[in-house]
Image: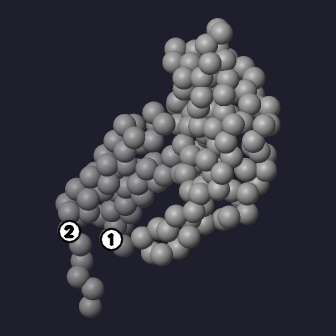
Amino acid sequence: MRKRQSPLGTLIFAVVFFVGGLMAYQHLTKPIAEEAEAAKEWPTTSGVITLSELNKTRNNEGKDMYSATIQYDYSVDGKKYNCSGIRTLDGSTSSKSSVKKTLKKYAKGTSVLVHYDPEFPNTAVLQPGTGFLLGMLLKLPLLFCIIAVLMVVKLFKSLLFGR
């Protein structure tokens, strides 16, 4: 026989879940997403790829992970800069083929459009915005809020209707 959970315990757990998800979203992922989206409005200048390399590392599970090192030169108001950001958040992947596509797109010597921060011109990206997958990942803490609301709804249903 299953032990019945305390309604107060469930409510406290749901509140903690909700507040945790909301705080994580507000203070961790939302600022990252806002900065990535703000980069879409940054001014642009032309640049040239100076380095395009494949990196291979191993994760904690011993699996090979790949990432691209892309560096590019560009000028703003006559001053030269060198940067390496493709997106606001660059990471590694287990998909070597997707990294090879990136390296092909940003081969050494390729001319590129650089989006630079007008306040800090040494900060730049080649692909502004979050993209679909990263955008969804950055909203993941809101899933905790949804789960918490569903827990409270179920709790009230069971209290009102005895289920």
Measured in 3D between alpha carbons, the distance from the residue under mark 2 to the one under mark 1, in whole angstroms, is 14 Å
Does residue 41 sit above or below 64 in this rendering? above
Outermost top residue: 77
Quadrant in the picture for residue 148: bottom left
Neighbourhood count class around disc 2 (C-alpha, 10 Å): few under 14, some 14–19, many 20 upward: few
Left or right: residue 7 compared with residue 63? left
Depth check, front residue: 77 or 126: 77
Which badge, 2 or 1, is on the more N-terminal residue? 2
Mark number for residue 6?
2
Residue that carries the numbered disc 1 in the rendered image = 162
Secondary structure category for the residue under label 1: loop
Nearer to us in this view, 17 or 5: 17
Label 1 neighbour load within 10 Å: few <14, some 14-19, many 20+: few
Q: Where 89 sits versus 158, above or below?
A: above
**Rendered view: 17 above or below 161:** above
The answer to whether any part of residue 108 appears in the image is yes
Name the amino acid type tagged 2.
Answer: Ser
User: At label 1, which amino acid type do we have?
Assistant: Gly
For the rendered model, the colour scheme is: one colour
Query: Can you tell which mark lies on residue 105?
Result: none
